Image (cartoon, coloured by chain):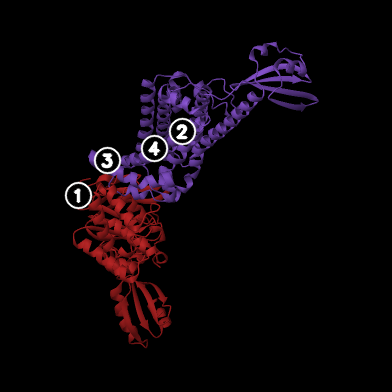
Chain colours: A purple, B red
Amino acid sequence: MMLLWARQVLAVLRLEMRKSFFARRGLWIYLLALAPVLLFAAYSYTATRERAQRAQRSTAAVLPLERLSEIQPEMTRADVIAILGRPGHRQIEKRRRVTHEFLWYSDARMDFIVHLTNGKVTGVNRRESANLTQDTLLFAGVFQFFYLRLAVFFGCLGVFVNLFRGELLDKSLHFYFLAPIRREVVLAGKFLAGLIATVVIFSISALLQLWALSMHLNAGDVQQYLWQGNGAHHVAAYLGVTALACLGYGSVFLAGGVFFRNPIVPAALVLIWESANWILPAALKKISIIFYLQSLSPIVAPAGMNVPPPLALLASTTAATPASLAIPGLLIMSLAALALAAAKLRKLEINYASD
Amino acid sequence: MTPDANTIVFESVSKFYGEVLGVNRVNLSIPPGITSLVGPNGSGKTTLMNLMTGLIQPSSGQILVRGVPPTKPERLFQFTGYCTPFDSFPRGLTGYQYVYSWLRLSGRSNAEADRMAWDAIDRVNLRDAALRKVAGYSKGMRQRIKLAQAISHDPAVLVLDEPLNGLDPLVRAETIALFREQARAGRHVILSSHVLQEVDAISDQVILLAGGYVVAEGQIHGVRGEIQDHPMQILIRCDKPGALAARVFEHDHVVEARIHADRRGLLVKTRDPEKFYLLLNQIALNGIEIESVAPADDDVNSVYEYLIGEEAAL
């Protein structure tokens, strides 16, 4: 019997794979997966350009670091130049009749910006150049707050909700229902097809994001991080979390597609539930995908990240739980969602007229 | 309900779509052979077929198809094929892939599925177009590829919703021959059609449906016998149909007389055919020239008309 089911699942997979990967209405999923790659590529480009500018500034004006502490408020530009020498770069801005002047110095690793307001020193700012430590935190933040909660979430919504609903819209679901195959096996085959498609798309996207992010870094540092530090472990963990996110969200949205005709309903319900996870009691927290995914992420996203107000709700973090509990917890949740979907599917009627 | 390995049994089956009646209190025991479901649109033909194949589930009652409930598709479709009314297919498939994929879904090996798919495609004469996308098929070709899929595993029960729709005369004749061959082999062929003459010609038994109710069932002549209370329809070809109508209406057993569209005949409905034939003899002796007299209701169409209503039959 198991052999028969395996054959049937493969038959469903053969039919579904092409639909899952190359559906015309699924083009936006690729764009969603590509968005963070472009974001990181742009970041790398900017960081590379800034580094080049900094190098230029440090060549033009070697900063005597020990004298930086001599800069005091109310000093004039002439005083500053007398102490630190000519700046590598000078920038003047006028805002509401107030003149802001910035004198840029650099030691090739860090920028020091002396800020003068109406000709008087009002502060000295430091700006560290992009580095591996910063970038790992940056990636952790984007991965948890954008990638998992938005890209993977909506990507899975697009793929899994349509596994059955799409067939009802196309009026082709009867093809499966009129075959000597248990509906649970059809569900398993379709789910696997969706899972393979989303895991491939979003794992490749995660890898490309990491590659794009590392483009501006020193190749030697990256190699060392990967093979002598925690890099390889982190990459594997991000890929694993991505796969688990596809599994978790996929199962929930597949069930949503079976239970609801309008995909906006399950999407909104799950989004609200997942976003409100942080205010839920401990027992209820465990009935959400993001709770387990955040626990499994290799780096805790910085809590103080500057998140725009509309995304603030999404940026709420949850308390971590060990991987030994998080993985089984997420698997149990997914299986429960699939079991509910299977029970509903067993009684699902083909009545295209009303769909 | 005792499972019977050779019949399709509906026991007090009702189906409601919300408040809309699909079929109501249907009791049927369908033996092997060609059985036609006849009825106007909305009479419940497709509902019965969908119930039989588990695409929908009864609101009440039980169904067994050769001893297997339709809720178990993994068993039912081992021996059942359904040529559906749905004119839609999984996207992007060729005709061959459509049949082949279905056979793979049933668990058959690649070689077996390939052989069976080509056999079925050959039986519906579609080999030349088999490697083209179904989306580009004509209505008739789509009908044939659906039929090929339904018969591809040589099923003991073949359910066909409007299977002759869109077929050209040659293919239609071949398809009907295929149904007869299946029936001769002791299999069930359940079909529905709006082309009543075809149903009449090929059916072993008919099930007449109207408004979700089974109004008659059995062999075509048996059904006629079931409705003895209904008036019989007779077509009289004559030179003065108006005068003939006036004469026959004087008698109580004549319930309706209608002049034929070509004004060369009269269609009479009578409750007592014997008395009417005697009456005709008298009329013929009194100046109305009668060319021919023929019962007009010995086919499904007229039985159907009697039971369901003239408008539906036409």
In this rendering, position of residue A267 left or right of residue B257:
right
Mark 2 residue element: helix
Of B187 and A263, nearer the camera is A263
Instruction: In the rendered view, tell whether residue B287 sits above or below residue B162.
Output: below
Residue B4 is tagged as 1
The reply to whether dot 2 and dot 3 touch (C-beta < 8 Å) is no
Q: Are marks 1 and 3 in contact (CB under 8 Å)?
A: no
Tag 4: residue type?
Answer: Leu
| 3D distance between C-alphas at marks 2 and 3 | 31 Å
- Determine if residue B87 is in view: yes
Amino acid type of the residue that numbered disc 2 sits on in the rendered structure? Ala
Q: Earlier in the sequence, mark 3 or mark 4?
A: 3
Q: Could you say whether the residue bearing mark 4 is in a helix, strand or loop?
A: helix
Q: Which residue is labeled 2 in the image?
A: A206
In which quarter of the view is residue B131 placed? Answer: bottom left
Instruction: Return the x and y of residue A249 as percentages of the image width and height.
Output: 43, 33
Q: Amino acid at mark 1?
A: Asp
Number of residues whose C-alpha sits closer than 10 Å to that of mark 3, classed few (under 14), some (14–19) or many (20 or more):
some
Identified by mark 3, the residue type is: Ala
Q: Please tell me whether mark 4 or mark 1 is closer to you in this view.
A: 4
Q: Quadrant of residue B164?
A: bottom left
Residue marked by disc 3? A6
Q: Residues within 10 Å of mark 1 (few under 14, many from 20)?
A: some
User: Looking at the image, can residue B19 be seen?
Assistant: no
Observer-side mark, 1 or 3, equals: 3
Residue depth check, mark 2 versus mark 3: number of the one nearer the observer: 2
- Marked residue nearer the N-terminal end (2 or 4): 4
